[in-house]
Amino acid sequence: MIIHGKVYDVTKFLDEHPGGYDIVVAASGKDGTEDFEEIGHSSTAKEMLADYYIGEYEGGDAHIEAPKSTAETKHSSGSGGMMKALLPLLVILIAIVLYQLRSA
């Protein structure tokens, strides 16, 4: 998961997440900064991110992106359905590889 331009492997936290694992999984494979900030996580939750940090997201932006307009969302949701389905898996795979390389 990417939050503020940093990559986190939160796989081990999925079962403990107070909002349920499905919320975390839904935000995986994309920049979850906006989702993370909108929920209003506590300072303790933000500090916990350090335990799951695995690296920086190159080419990413550490700032929150402005929400897309309804027209943009409708237009972009119809294209690249297969890629949108595979992108979260690719990001998770990259995060796992980076984590393993870092701990080696």
Image (tube, rainbow, N blue to C red):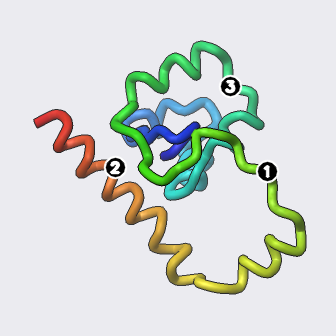
User: CB under 8 Å between callouts 2 and 3?
Assistant: no
Spatial CA distance of label 3 from label 1 is 19 Å
User: CB under 8 Å between callouts 3 and 1?
Assistant: no
Q: Image point 42% across, 50% down: which residue?
A: 58
Q: Image point 64% across, 36% down: which residue?
A: 19
Left or right: where 57 falls relative to 71:
left
**First along the sequence among labels 3 and 1:** 3
- In the image, farthest residue toward the left: 104
Indicate the position of residue 38 as horizontal and vertical percent values: 77, 37
- Viewer-nearest of discs 2 and 1: 1
- Pointer 1 local density, CA inside 10 Å: few below 14, some 14–19, many at least 20: few
In the picture of the structure, the residue carrying the numbered disc 1 is: 66
- Pointer 3 local density, CA inside 10 Å: few below 14, some 14–19, many at least 20: few
Q: Is residue 70 above or below residue 33?
A: below
- Pointer 2 local density, CA inside 10 Å: few below 14, some 14–19, many at least 20: many
In the picture of the structure, the residue carrying the numbered disc 3 is: 41
In the picture of the structure, the residue carrying the numbered disc 2 is: 95
**First along the sequence among labels 2 and 3:** 3
Q: Nearer the viewer, residue 49 or 19?
A: 49
Spatial CA distance of label 2 from label 3 is 23 Å
Tell me which amino acid carries mark 2. Answer: Ala
**First along the sequence among labels 2 and 1:** 1
Q: Is residue 5 above or below residue 47?
A: below
Q: Nearer the viewer, residue 10 or 63?
A: 63
Residue at disc 1, secondary structure: loop
Tell me which amino acid carries mark 3. Answer: His
Q: Image point 39% across, 31% down: which residue?
A: 53
- Viewer-nearest of discs 2 and 3: 2
Tell me which amino acid carries mark 1. Answer: Ala
